[in-house]
Image (tube, rainbow, N blue to C red):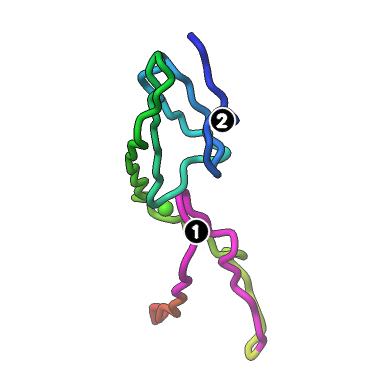
């Protein structure tokens, strides 16, 4: 079965793909460079055996991000002196499919 590499696909985003026949494009996401969230447009031109080219057909593939991000606070625990400044760092928080867009910090009243 012939396998097409990303370099054989035109377009800005490298995609590892295989081609089971000339009629199908099987798009397999490269975990290192997945198809981005949002609108992705593919086009197809077919050529007959006389060399005549079709008009461009277009298909839209919308990739959704439905996974929740993971919040991480560092350090998870610390002891400070009364009146001392300190830092809580949320920069190790992460998301699959997107980026962290907002940080909502809350001071929870401690039980008395
Ligand atoms: Ca996500």
Q: Position of residue 42 (x, y in %)?
A: 40, 38
The vertical placement of 15 against 96, above or below, is: above
Location of residue 46 (image quadrant): top left
Secondary structure beneath dot 2 equals helix
Find disc 2 in the rendering and name its residue: 6
Image coordinates of residue 69 in percent, x first then y, are 44, 56
Is residue 102 depicted above or below 20 in this figure?
Answer: below
Numbered label attached to residue 35: none
Residue 85 picture quarter: bottom right
- Number of callouts in the render? 2
Residue range highlighted in magenta? 84-104
Between label 2 and label 1, give the one nearer the viewer: 2
Q: Nearer the viewer, residue 103 or 85?
A: 103
Q: Position of residue 78 (x, y in %)?
A: 62, 70
Residue at 48% over, 21% down: 18
Q: Is residue 94 magenta?
A: yes
The image's mark for residue 99 is 1
Q: SS at mark 1?
A: loop
Q: Residues within 10 Å of mark 1 (few under 14, many from 20)?
A: few
């Amino acid at each position: 079965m012939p396998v097409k590499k990303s370099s054989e696909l035109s377009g800005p985003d490298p995609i590892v793909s295989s081609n089971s026949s000339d009629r199908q494009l099987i798009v397999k996401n490269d975990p290192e460079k997945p198809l981005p969230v949002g609108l992705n447009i593919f086009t197809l031109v077919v050529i007959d055996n006389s060399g005549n080219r079709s008009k461009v057909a277009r298909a839209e593939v919308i990739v959704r991000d439905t996974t929740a991000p993971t919040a991480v606070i560092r350090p998870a625990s610390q002891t400070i002196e009364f009146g001392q400044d300190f830092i809580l760092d949320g920069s190790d928080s992460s998301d699959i499919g997107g980026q962290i867009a907002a940080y909502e910090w809350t001071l929870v009243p401690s039980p008395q």
